[in-house]
Amino acid sequence: MSEPAGSRVGTVVTHRRYVPYSHAHYAGNLVDGAYSLGLFGDVATEMCIVLDGDEGLFASYSDVQFRAPVRAGDVVEVTATLVREGTRSRVMDFTVQVVGRGAPSAVAPGRAEVLDPPVVATTATGTVVVPPAAGT
């Protein structure tokens, strides 16, 4: 399927967020995978606002991959990239990367480091829908 001239495909929205310790659910301060999916919803909402002036509604996820742990104390970068646009549907690729990580508190309280390169923690593809354009 070819995209029309002036296509918005390739539009990117990125958020950065500190993962608070209140989100740790498992030993080792691990955060559950639903945390990443919630962040995907946040960047998808902004993408729909930017493109369509509406928050949109998430319809589905496909190919969700949990590749590396997300831990409390991490700084994550969450990205949505528009890969396909239909009349009302918007298909996006999502990525959560850990760009910073707190050191274990036994080492030195408050110590953290920037990860270079970042660690890809979660990827997915998702589809959102928006209302019909005015006049259609």
Image (spheres, rainbow, N blue to C red):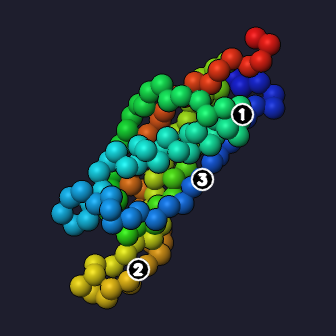
Q: Is residue 113 above or below residue 47?
A: below
| Cα–Cα span, label 2 and label 3 | 22 Å
| Cα–Cα span, label 1 and label 2 | 38 Å
Quadrant containing the N terminus in the rendered view: top right
Amino acid type at circle 2 is Ala
Residue 32 shown left or right of residue 46 in the figure: left
Residue underneath mark 1: 53
Image coordinates of residue 24 in percent, x first then y, are 28, 60
- In contact (CB < 8 Å): disc 2 and disc 3: no
Of pointers 1 and 2, the one earlier in the residue sequence: 1
Residue underneath mark 2: 112
Residue underneath mark 3: 14
Amino acid type at circle 3 is Thr
How many C-alpha atoms fall within 10 Å of the one at disc 3: few (<14), some, or many (≥20)?
some
Looking at the rendered structure, the secondary structure element under dot 3 is: strand
- In contact (CB < 8 Å): disc 1 and disc 2: no
Residue 66 shown left or right of residue 41 in the figure: left
Looking at the rendered structure, the secondary structure element under dot 1 is: loop
Q: Is residue 49 above or below residue 73?
A: above
Q: Is residue 80 above or below residue 120?
A: above
The residue lying at 56 percent from left, 45 percent from top is 43
How many C-alpha atoms fall within 10 Å of the one at disc 2: few (<14), some, or many (≥20)?
some
The residue lying at 63 percent from left, 40 percent from top is 47
| Cα–Cα span, label 1 and label 3 | 18 Å
Most distant residue in the front direction: 22
